């Protein structure tokens, strides 16, 4: 939905998304996930698109090394009036039974792994008092 809009609009993207994943604003671009990007050896990727009207221009690609089938990703610290771009991405690796954290937008290898999950699908975090 465009900022200030009241209805969703279709956006043409210059990339084939084989198995759609998450969609989230990263503070600068629209981040669109592909769980099994064919041209990236079936790894999960997040494409960044600059949006103008009803079309997008590809601005970058984040390859989530060590993962495929990241159905939903989460870019923490974006939103609620924050102007900065995301610096990390959290993604449950549905094919690997763990949740990984990468730097963003230049992912490379994971910087942290939480193992021992069974069929993880989505990721979110809440602030809890200790």
Image (cartoon, rainbow, N blue to C red):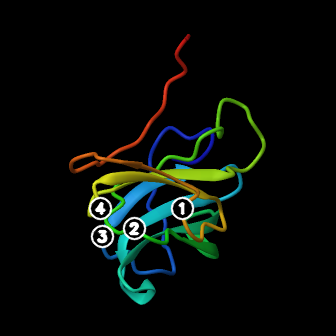
Q: Is residue 127 visible?
A: yes
The answer to the question of whether label 2 and label 4 lie on touching residues, with beta carbons closer than 8 A, is: yes
Q: Mark 1 against mark 3, which lies toward the viewer?
A: 1
x, y (%) of residue 124?
A: 44, 36
Q: Mark 3 against mark 4, which lies toward the viewer?
A: 4
In the picture of the structure, the residue carrying the numbered disc 4 is: 96
Q: Mark 3 against mark 2, which lies toward the viewer?
A: 2
CA–CA distance between discs 2 and 4?
A: 7 Å
* Marking on residue 110: 1
Which of the pair 102/23 is nearer the observer?
Answer: 102
CA–CA distance between discs 3 and 4?
A: 17 Å
Residue drawn 50% across the image and 38% down it: 6
Q: Earlier in the sequence, mark 1 or mark 3?
A: 3
x, y (%) of residue 27?
A: 69, 49
* Marking on residue 67: 2
Residue drawn 54% across the image and 61% down it: 110
Judging from the image, what secondary structure is the residue with disc 2 in? Answer: loop
The answer to the question of whether label 1 and label 2 lie on touching residues, with beta carbons closer than 8 A, is: yes
Which of the pair 110/50 is nearer the observer?
Answer: 110
Which of the pair 77/28 is nearer the observer?
Answer: 77
Judging from the image, what secondary structure is the residue with disc 1 in? Answer: loop
Judging from the image, what secondary structure is the residue with disc 4 in? Answer: loop
Judging from the image, what secondary structure is the residue with disc 3 in? Answer: loop
Q: Earlier in the sequence, mark 3 or mark 2?
A: 3
In the picture of the structure, the residue carrying the numbered disc 3 is: 19
CA–CA distance between discs 4 and 1?
A: 13 Å
Q: Earlier in the sequence, mark 1 or mark 2?
A: 2
Q: Which corner quadrant of the image does residue 57 belong to?
A: bottom right
Q: Is residue 72 visible?
A: no
CA–CA distance between discs 1 and 2?
A: 9 Å
Residue drawn 29% across the image and 61% down it: 96
Q: Earlier in the sequence, mark 4 or mark 1?
A: 4
């Amino acid at each position: 939905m465009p900022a200030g809009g009241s209805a969703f609009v279709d956006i043409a993207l210059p990339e084939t998304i084989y198995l759609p994943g998450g969609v989230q604003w990263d503070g600068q671009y629209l981040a669109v996930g592909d769980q099994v990007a064919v041209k990236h050896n079936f790894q999960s990727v997040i494409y960044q698109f600059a949006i103008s009207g009803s079309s997008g221009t590809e601005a970058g690609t984040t390859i989530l090394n060590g993962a495929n089938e990241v159905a939903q990703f989460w870019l923490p610290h974006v939103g609620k009036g924050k102007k900065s771009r995301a610096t990390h991405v959290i993604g449950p690796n549905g094919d690997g039974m763990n949740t990984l954290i990468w730097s963003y937008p230049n992912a490379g290898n994971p910087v942290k792994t939480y193992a021992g999950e069974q069929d993880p699908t989505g990721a979110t975090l809440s602030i809890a008092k200790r």
